[in-house]
Image (tube, helix red, strand yellow):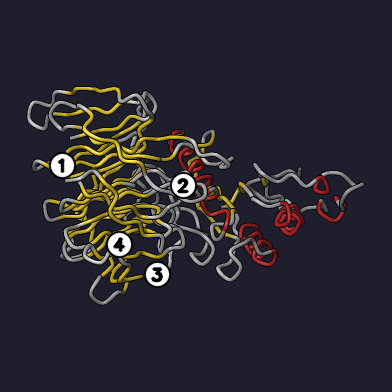
Amino acid sequence: MWVLNADDQTISRVDPRAKDVRTLGIGATPTDLAAGPSGLWVGNGGKLARAQFAGTTAVALTRLDAHTGAVRATVSLPRTGSSRSNVAQSHIAVAAGSVWAIAPDFSLVRIDSSRNAVTAVSRDVAADAVAADRDAAWVLNDDGIVARIDARSNRVTIRVRVPTTGLSALAVGDRSVWATDPYQGTLWRIDPGSRVVQRTIDVGVGADSVAFGLGSVWVSNSLQGTLSRVDPATDRVVRTIALGNTPRAVAVGEGLVWVAVAGERHIPAVQSGREKSVRALPGTICGPLVSGPKAPRFIVVSDLPLCGGPRFVTPQMSAAILHALRRRSFRAGGYSVAFQSCDHSTAQTGLFDERKCAANTKAYAANADVIGVVGPYNSGCAYAEIPIANRAALPIVSPTNSDVGLTRPAFGAPRRLFVPCTRRAAVPTCV
């Protein structure tokens, strides 16, 4: 079993029987890895010119001998333009003598492991993640489409649109393709034969890695600190294992399930209380209610655009808020709190919508259990939200609003924004 640690630029080899660990430095920043009969393939990270907001991305693959760790070959990944996001997980897959890798321009590259040479490049996809079997490679596109690339023709033969905020990882097994949506907390099951989404399975907000093996689907949850086992015969979670800290990846091999867990400080796994003493916001605008082991007394929401252009940033912001609450055991002072991630963008435009910003805030203000909003992302949305929130004495904290007119009379209309407010039981003063 191979484990990557990007922070100290090492990879580790774990003996599945003796559990001995051998750590190797590879002289570059590893971005991802995958193993197969041809050896271990590691993403070799580098910076790209004219990509100001992109971090390290794989510009080549290094092939290592699985027994000695010696470098056998280095294969550069062809590219045009610059990278498009900082996604790195699940960027390499090995199957049937081929290595499939996502290039910096998010095309899919096929490498013949017998020749250590690129044999095909598919630019008909904009891939975020890849999984493969003997017959095909499957990719997550950045537009919510799952695509199949045939191993014989190297062409896209199937495209399936998944109606979700964003997918994070793929697995292939039991004649199905499995994809995780960490923001809605669902596992999607796709039937390649019918080309339709067959099932959605509740695996908890934060479920972002998936693997198939031992007759089951295994889903790790980085926010809740758990591993779930899904029975493909019933499409149900049959067991959830509390791991704590931050699970980052899951794999199956040697009759075992392996989970990479990050974090030096122990953070307990989330186990939501059975009784909910708060009224959750509707699923039409917000994700599921997430809380700790005790029944929550209040709700904190994030109010961000989760569709369109900002979607690579804003779901991560929402996940960070949830992570911060989890580290504090979902407590604020003497109270237990719950969290909901809400969306004020529309699929029609892919951007924030002022009317939806206002409608969302009215829903927050009408729910006495909501005591705070983190957001919005855009200043234009804040102009619609502040008067409504102010009348209800509902606090808003935005990490990104920067329009001067929100606070200075010479540039805007603060009197229109900050009007006399009513008293709320949870928040007795107006700010």
- Residue type, mark 2 in image: Pro
The spot of residue 141 in percent (x, y) is: 41, 60
Q: Earlier in the sequence, mark 3 or mark 1?
A: 1
| Quadrant in which the N terminus is drawn | top left
Q: Which residue is mark 1?
A: 38
The spot of residue 89 in percent (x, y) is: 36, 44
Query: What secondary structure is found at the residue carrying circle 2?
Result: loop
Q: Earlier in the sequence, mark 4 or mark 3?
A: 3
Cα gap from disc 1 to disc 4, whole angstroms: 35 Å
| Residue farthest to the bottom, as pictured | 194
Which one is in front in this view, the residue at disc 1 or the one at disc 4?
1
Q: Which residue is mark 4?
A: 201
Q: Nearer the viewer, residue 139 or 197?
A: 139
Q: Which residue is mark 3?
A: 161
| Residue farthest to the right, as pictured | 410
Question: Which mark is on residue 405?
Answer: none
For mark 4, does the 10 Å Cα neighbourhood hold few (<14), some (14 to 19), or many (20 or more) residues? Answer: some
Q: Is residue 253 left or right of residue 58?
A: left
For mark 1, does the 10 Å Cα neighbourhood hold few (<14), some (14 to 19), or many (20 or more) residues? Answer: some
Query: What secondary structure is found at the residue carrying circle 4?
Result: strand
Residue at (36% x, 70% y) in the render: 160
